[in-house]
Image (tube, rainbow, N blue to C red):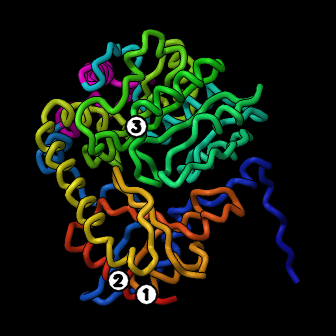
Amino acid sequence: MATTTPLPLATPMARTSRSPIVEAQSWVAGKTFAPDRPLLNVSQAAPMAPPPLALRQEIARLAVEDDEVHLYGAVLGLDALRAELARQVSTTYHAQVNAADIAITSGANEAFTAVMSTLAASGDEVILPTPWYFNHKMWCDMAGVTAVPLPTGADMLPDLEQAASLITPRTRAIVLVTPNNPAGVEYPSELLTKFYVLARTHGIDLVVDETYRDFDAREGAPHILLRQPDWRDTLVQIYSFSKAYRLTGHRVGALTASPERLLQVEKYLDTVTICPNQLGQRAALWGMQNLGDWLAGERDEILKRRRALEDGFAPLAAKGWTLLGTGGFFAYVAHPFDMASSALAPWLVDHAGVLVLPATFFTPAGDPRGARELRIAFANLDCDAITDLLERLQQIDP
């Protein structure tokens, strides 16, 4: 009988879990759904539609007419895009951010891994509120960095005093996500300021992932962190163009940090991708300069869908469901069933035609909340489909 030789694998990679999105997609592989009851895929927050036609036409024009888009570019990104993002960030946050404070990356995930590679190494610690964004935890595992869980309360917000109690000599950063993935909640400005002071007091960095900031329900600047006189000593901000302009396939994200930090980030980017996607960068620049009104309409539509989910949740609440948080592209819910969410989520594919992610993907192993909660990425459903989703969930009895 033939034997299989174990795959040689570095220990950090061996203990890193498989991508939850990849695993969830396997639950629907090879399955068909009736035309009158199609699969409702609320597993992933990436826009499922292409960019608006005008932007696609500009991309096509650039691909044909601009030879530069097919060549290597600057490691830290297109100068014009860095300058435009700095200008818009300065306007939005009533702050002074310079082009030298901006790096363009191949998506927000690369922005995170790039800056974290300058902050933490094997044996160090990073504090992540739970439920956490699974790719943040996966990077920690791959890098040999300990992800220290900071449980959130009933309001899905982290507690400052509890965070302070978790800081040790090995702590290198606190990572916050707002609007949150997976819980959806928008972190109050006052809370972010307190975390900034905490990080600064302890000489560690505060990394704030604002991938979904274009869909924040609040008017005006969501925080005042960039107005702090010495923010470059403490703050790192992450952004994604993918959600705003539907450029997911082009992989364009950004970092805001000190120029000194970005000089170190440049080493990582030059090793991994050499430069961000040239065509995608120019598409992001054109979008920032020409699609302001279109993006405002996109935000209004996402907020409309959020209200539809919130307003339609009462029948589910009557059956024991709890809406724990909404915002950005997400709703985070607790279900009333004895079945663990890790079993319920694939069960829902077959019995309700719904693909949703269990909270076990966002929580430490053994966390009891993981068994009770689910993440619903509602942004790709219109209001009628959201009504259909809620009705399907009302009808189940596992």
- The answer to which of marks 2 and 3 sits earlier in the sequence is 3
Give residue 188's quadrant in the image: top left
* Left or right placement of residue 150 versus residue 158 in this view: right
Q: Residue at x 62, y 57 (%)?
A: 363
Q: Residue at x 68, y 43 (%)?
A: 147
Residue 57 percent location from the top left of the image: 13, 45
Mark 1–mark 2 Cα distance, whole angstroms, equals 7 Å
Residue on which disc 3 sits: 188
Viewer-proximal residue, 368 or 7?
Answer: 368
- The answer to whether residue 31 is above or below residue 168 is below
- Predominant secondary structure, magenta span: helix
* Left or right placement of residue 160 versus residue 302 in this view: right
Q: Which residues are magenta?
A: 62-91
Residue on which disc 2 sits: 392
Residue furthest top in the image = 229
Of labels 1 and 3, the one closer to you: 3
Q: How would you rate the neighbour count of disc 2 (Cα within 10 Å): few for under 14, some for 14-19, many for 20 or more?
A: some
Asked whether residue 107 appears in the rendered view, the answer is no
Residue 69 percent location from the top left of the image: 29, 32
Q: Is residue 70 magenta?
A: yes
**Amino acid under label 3?**
Pro
